[in-house]
Amino acid sequence: MTTATYPEKAISYLYEVGMHGGIRRAADALGINPSVVSRQLSLLERSLQLPLLERRGRNVVLTEAGKLLADDYAQTSQRRKLLERQLRDMRHMRGGSVTLRVGQGIVEEVVNNVLKEFSVAWPGVFVDISSGDMQSTVDLIMRGEVDMAVGFGTAGPPGLKSHSFRRGPICAIVRPDHPIAGYSKISIAELTQHRLITMSENFGLQRYLSAIFKSEGQVLAPAYCCNLFSSALSLCQAGLGIAFMTEQAIPQVLRQQELRAIPLDHRIARESQSHLLRSADHRFTPAASYLWQLLCNFFYESEAKESASPGERR
């Protein structure tokens, strides 16, 4: 087998296994059956006549040969993505492009307070916006598929350049006729007496909730688990349980008094943070640099308002 005939799909699976530390976790990230990944990697090992994986405890790691293949795949993929971006810029003829990943609970704020100003200053730049959970966001930045991102989570991930901003408090979101709707705050112990709506564990919000319940010695046993904030809100609006978000994530719904936000009475909930993220070694275009600065300014200003006393807030 020559390098020109290497099976790229199998090598891409190998790369994902190395990134996620296991065949099953890699398959979950790829959205395919673990047996498909395992079969492709076995065929690749036989064709190369070299071991590519070895088990260490509960994790699977790459051998030296596996690391060489995965590193080459990562470098090749990055070069191709750069080429695709340059060709896309030529097709659009819009003066370049910026890729931005935004957490689901922050989209409205970023669009209204950042992208409007950016579009005035850089009307010719194509902006590719996507949304998703924190872990997927970090993976995309590490692969060079996203220029920058705004996420919500327990800590700024290692290996990335980040700015962190106070976002709390995390609130229990309920209908006006819910038994806790009139509370000024709610304890974790009392929450366990109600039907709860949570997000999947990849969401930064859910990692906060898990940490909060664990610190109180309480078991988080939700009635529903969602992978979309809109699904959690729909369940909440239907009176099927208590959802969890910050007030900033649903300003219009709260203004219209369709739902109520009750702060959780816990230090972690009050100190929750959002993170502005980028790769430490990725060079920005002038347009991307301007968007990054706008995002920094907006979240710094939002944090200052949140920290102000009630009388000083607008």
Image: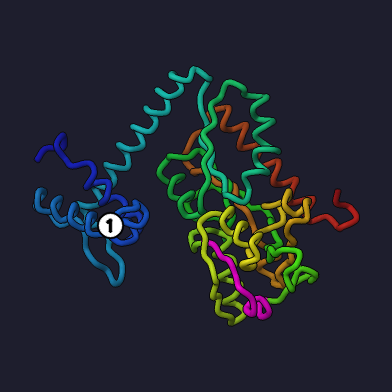
In the current view of this chain or complex, which residue is farthest to the front?
Answer: 238
Q: What stretch is highlighted in magenta?
A: 188-199
Amino acid type at image mark 1: Asn
Q: In this view, does 132 lie above or below 118?
A: below
Query: Crowdedness of circle 1 by 10 Å Cα count: few (<14), some, many (20+)?
Result: few
Whether residue 245 is visible to the viewer of this picture, yes or no, is yes
- Element type where label 1 sits in the image: loop
Residue 96 location in percent, x, y? 51, 24
Whether residue 244 is visible to the viewer of this picture, yes or no, is no
Q: Which residue is pictured at 33% across the width and 38% down the height?
A: 77
> In the shown orientation, is residue 82 left or right of residue 267?
left
Q: Name the residue under label 1.
A: 33
Q: Which residue is pictured at 28% across the width and 57% down the height?
A: 33
Q: Which residue is pictured at 60% across the width and 70% down the height?
A: 196
Q: In this view, does 46 lie above or below 178?
A: above
Q: Answer with the quarter of the image where residue 153 lies.
A: bottom right
Residue 114 location in percent, x, y? 67, 36
